[in-house]
Image: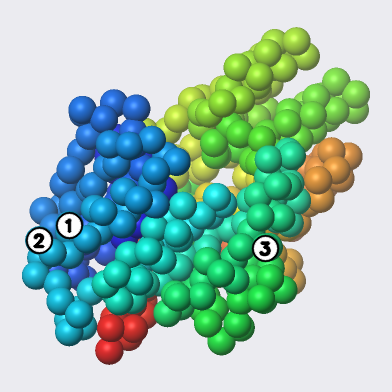
Amino acid sequence: MISGDRSLAEDKRGAFYNTLEEFHKHWDRVDIIVPRIKNYELRITNVFGNVFIHTSPWTLIFQPFWIYREGLRILKANGYSLMAKNYLMTVHDYPPFYNGLGAYLLNLATRVPYVLEIHHIPGYPKAANLKEWIYKVFARLFIKIDSSRAKLVRVVNKNQTPDFLIKAGVPEGKIAYISSMYIDLDIFKPMNLPKKYDLIFVGRLAENKGINLLLEAVKLSIINLQFPIKCLIVGDGPLETFCKLKIENWKLRDKVLMYGRAKDSSEIARLLNESKILIMPSYNEGGPRVVVEAMACGVPVLATPVGIAPDLLKNGSGGEIITWDVKDIVLKIRALLNDSDGYKRYGLTGSEIVKQFEKKETIRNYADKLKEILG
């Protein structure tokens, strides 16, 4: 596996760890090549016995060459030859496409087949800043070349990312939807806990997550419209100080709680169950996983039309789509909080819809699709 996710090397037990907890059972050995981490000397090199983590000692600009060099070393150490048929690479790629370039070079040298995984396009459908807009343009120009040697291009939503790829020149027959929503339904389930919060936001505190829109919506609701709501923000990231300053300046300390990063899935499930509505105002996403987790908990969702949200929140199931307009967000929050029948309906339909994402079966399906490529 070639990934940009450093969390395993940093000993963080997040979504990637939870996926591998089941995924590793389907393979004799899994090697994961990741970029350099801040505390390189403290890097983790093995989890679950047969999952080996190879962290680059070089800066990110040299990552394609580290992938090529370390990939060759791993293959040679495990007896690879051009006649071997039991090796496969998965490549999580995104602008500036250093993972895809590294896989391209490694494939040229070894003929090991690979699956290119495009979870989302930064800046699409909407850019949060100039950098994302540039990445979107770069992706449109480069993605056809990036995917040219891949056996398959995996996408994790049914419409949004495939539409972009097809328009950018990737053959439709090469694109396959294989879900990455691996949800443990023994953890994410309705718990009948008292509701402490009207809204909950779970995610990285970054521009593309639309945290600015959420804070503006809470301010408009409470200060301008005198409609009191209580909001829980779960996560950390580069905009954490920005959020705290906004909350302080707008005198929202009693209404907006900065919780910090949840320690594990069980904690996220509890916090979701203590909340009435999940709010997800992102500008672009591949999933996100938290939409499915909230629905599994019977919590209605208000989300922008990104990633998997349009696939799930349709025909009155699970929640509603919001726009990137603060007034629209506030109106839909108020309407849902005041509609007890609609609220119950969304909770019930959502928890039924997401049963298709049960962790073990969804990961088994992913592993089986990869094994089909190996023949």
Q: Which residue is mark 3?
A: 141
Q: Which residue is mark 1?
A: 73
Image position of 322 with respect to 256: above or below? below
Tag 1 near tag 2, CB within 8 Å:
yes
- Residue 120 quadrant: bottom right
Query: What element does badge 3 sit on?
Result: helix
Query: What element does badge 1 sit on?
Result: helix
Circle 2 packing at 10 Å, graded few (<14), some (14-19), many (20+), is few
Please state which amino acid type lies under the numbered disc 3.
Leu
- Percent across and percent down for residue 163 are 69, 72
Q: Earlier in the sequence, mark 3 or mark 2?
A: 2
Residue occupying the point 30% across, 76% down: 111
C-alpha distance separating marks 3 and 1: 32 Å
Please state which amino acid type lies under the numbered disc 2.
Ala
Q: Is residue 26 shown to the viewer in this render? A: yes
Which residue extends farthest bottom? 375
Instruction: Name the side, left or right, on which 73 lies relative to 347.
Output: left
Residue 35: image tag: none
- Percent across and percent down for residue 79 are 9, 70
Q: Quadrant of the N terminus?
A: bottom left
- Residue 246 quadrant: top right
Residue 77: image tag: 2
Residue occupying the point 35% across, 51% down: 65
